[in-house]
Image (tube, rainbow, N blue to C red):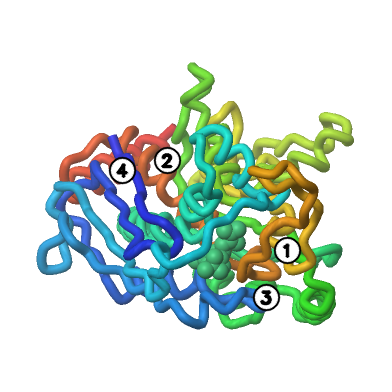
Amino acid sequence: MLRFVTAGESHGPSLVAILDGLPAGVPIDVQRLQQEMRRRQLGYGRGPRMQLETDTVELLSGVRRGITLGSPVALMIKNKDASIDRLPVVTQPRPGHADLTGAIKYDHRDIRNVLERASARETAARVAVGAVCQQLLASLDITLASHVTALGSVRATPAVAASATALRAKVDGTPLRCVDSAATKQMIRQIDAAVKTGDTLGGVFEVLAFGVPPGLGSYVQYDRRLDAILGRAILSIHAVKAVEIGDGVLGASLPGSSVQDEIFYKKGAGFRRSSNRAGGFEGGMTTGQPIVVRGFLKPLSTLRKPLRSVEINTKRPVVATVERTDVTTVPAAGVIGEAMIAFELARAVLEKFGSDSLRELQRNHQSYLRQVAQF
Ligand code: EPS
């Protein structure tokens, strides 16, 4: 079973992740890992911390001469800002962050003990894990990309992408990882306005996965439904408050005849659909069409224009602590979304094709694809 844990505080010495359960024989390209880390740091509206950090990944175990060994892979990202022991005590919780409930739950009188771990900096470790998983998936021709579909009140025109490579090429060099350049300009204007007022902005990112075989996940038990698993994975990302798969939200207000993807068959080409409103899932299983998952982020809760709060010792009304922060992280959240989906897909693939080595995995995968083609 593929699993991972992360450790590390935002301003501690480093972030660490252990990814356990990878098959042996997977080539790991460290340069490509590094590119994924860099993608998480980009985006107009990110704060000064991203100028400071390089988010360099060190592979500590589980990989030898660029190939996985089948043993746990440990990854480390050293923090340049490792000032945790010098940072002041925090006693004025920020509404919307983990501050107050975290302090109550763990009985901390210094909220810094909560916010250091609750910080979205932890997602750097997740992106490192996801980047390794993407390399495993690439060996089965499963590829992922993401883009921003809305930021603040601005919505982008939907992206039409035939492949992850095409979508990445379209968005990764743009300031907000968005296909719509006119919408990007408006988004930038909103970010600039939020900088002036000390506010923050949320938005929506979309993750797509291409080349996914039909039949990952299962309808037979609630906890084997892969769409539900992906929903949890996306909701686990900081500030995400809602998830959508395919046209899920729109579909709720339409008649059934306008929502399902009709089935066609052509000799030689097999079964096909002319639409993908289901976002690649029916009955909790992948259909073989691209997976389309969206994450909806609330605006970040660290505000330079702080909201009303209460000092936890005196119980007097105050305004919340002002921490250095980003104005928006929606472009980065898409990259984190990719990492989380990559991890869950890698896990589902390994569960279905059970494998200790890449060779065995590729053989089982190919044999299943032949079976599917003959159905
Ligand atoms: C982040 C690092 C953090 C924040 C952000 C994400 O760095 P610092 O706290 O030093 O500015 O920029 O964290 C949050 C938005 C949050 O709410 O915790 C990162 O590496 O992504």
Who comes first in sequence, dot 3 or dot 4?
3
Is any part of residue 295 visible from this angle?
Answer: no
**Quick check: which quadrant has ligand 1?**
bottom right
Total numbered circles: 4
Which residue lies under the disc numbered 4?
365
Label 1, label 4: how many angstroms apart (C-alpha)?
48 Å
Who comes first in sequence, dot 2 or dot 4?
4
Label 2, label 3: how many angstroms apart (C-alpha)?
47 Å
Which residue lies under the disc numbered 2?
373
Q: Residue at x 51, y 73 (%)?
A: 41
Which dot, 2 or 4, sits closer to the camera? 4
Which dot, 1 or 3, sits closer to the camera? 1
Under mark 4, the amino acid is His
Under mark 1, the amino acid is Leu
Name the mark on residue 49. Answer: none
Q: Residues within 10 Å of mark 2 (few under 14, many from 20)?
A: few
Picture layout, residue 58 above or below residue 127:
below
* Mark 1: secondary structure: loop
Residue 82 sits in quarter: bottom left
* Mark 4: secondary structure: helix
